[in-house]
Image (cartoon, rainbow, N blue to C red):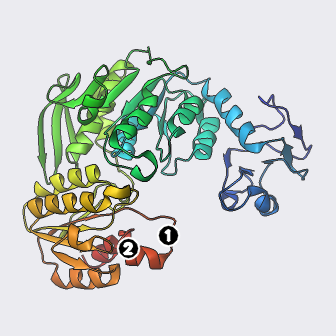
Amino acid sequence: MLDPHAALPFAATVDPLARPAQRLTWDSREASPEVAFVALPGEKMHGNRFVEAALAAGAPFVLTDLDVERGVRVPDAQAALFTWARQERAKNHLVVGITGSAGKTTAKSYVAAALDAHFMPVFNTPPAIACFLIQYGKGGKPLVVEMGIDRVGEMAELVDLVQPDVGVITTIGATHLEALGTVDNVAFEKGHILRDITGQPLRRSLGALVGAQAAAYFPETATYGFGEATFAGKDLHVTPEGATFTFAGQPVSLPHAATVQAEAAVLGLALAQGAGIPLHEAAGRMAAVQVPAGRYRVYPGRYTVIDDAYNASPIAVHAALEALSSFPGRRVSVLGRMLELGDTERALHAEVGQQARAKADVTYGVGAFASELGERAYRNVPELLAALLADTQDGDVILIKASRGISWTPEQRATEGVGLDTVVAALLEEQ
């Protein structure tokens, strides 16, 4: 329990009616008699506007600069939240931070299973990470934190907050180029996760690991994956049913997995081995991993749907197309726009489209850059969906992938060809 009357790592005036909570949230809609609310500044409005709504929902306390009932009053709620998070994180013996241009959520899922750890949910903003650290920092289990960035300096800030014992980079590629400029800059910024808060390389055993794809950017860092990696899986076999391999003599079987998931499992096993966890226990837990919707989830039926629609970048689409090519039957790629690629976006979409044409039998593109992405190009999602449903055949294998455009309106999403989760839903309904 989070007791506002206990010793806090910041100066605060605590209302006598404030009660302990099970966890914190920065979203007033999640406030309840068990969930306290933190009123933070936002891009469009301040969380103080929702304090009364959180209190009405029964929030045990509210962290805010306002003088309110059940308030924990501080000069700066965000600074207080982050200070509290650092204090609780310091009580944990093993925190793994994971970043990369693709594969972060997959790696997080497999590492958490291997270590039997608490892990960050999908939403991974700094306030979300802080709330997670406060809730779980002093628990007995390791923590796994996904650390995504989209601006210069953000990873250094996250490292200061999370202070990971192990820093992991899954991949490096063309992502968030509008803010980061070049792939080299992406590598430099994400590379902060491999260093401690003083800027020095992590000294702990297994303190830094990078996926084999990213090895060229970090030549002094241990690698994981297959082939010549420092921590290598062996005898990888990928079929439509899943992936199998061995690691340090331990057989591993991952249902409905492809190479990306197998690489994440190698990472999990390397960290489990370093933590003294029996490999057979880690492998057993990883065999039961269910990644969130939209992250390469395979739905078999009269046709197979590969739901990889949560997000997209050139490197992630390439991996998904490689996985698609391993399936028998007519292979169909349905691709939408990849966001935040800057001045190179048309060329990068054309490159991805070439890969799609090489790996798939039928290629669809939708929205902006539709003709670059597929032979069958459609202006918007409704037109695409009508054509796709009319053409789908028993035995097809259909890959769906695009960026989310999560802040866009439904009309923008339909026009630009992002957020193809609606296409996945329609296919599954017809399946």
What residue is at 30 percent from the left and 44 percent from the top?
173
* Farthest-out residue, front: 343
Q: Is residue 233 left or right of residue 151?
A: left
Q: Secondary structure at mark 2?
A: helix
Residue 417 visible in image: yes
Contact (Cβ within 8 Å) of mark 2 with mark 1? yes
Query: Which of these two is toward me, 302 or 172?
Result: 172
Instruction: Determine which residue is flagged by label 1.
Output: 408
Q: Is residue 18 left or right of residue 271?
A: right
Q: Position of residue 411 (x, y in %)?
A: 46, 79
Residue 312 visible in image: no
What residue is at 75 percent from the left and 54 percent from the top?
33
Disc 2 and disc 1: Cα gap in Å?
10 Å
Q: Is residue 145 above or below residue 166?
A: below
Instruction: Determine which residue is flagged by label 2.
Output: 416
Q: Is residue 217 left or right of residue 96?
A: left
Q: Quadrant of residue 191?
A: top left
Q: Identify the amino acid type marked 2.
A: Glu
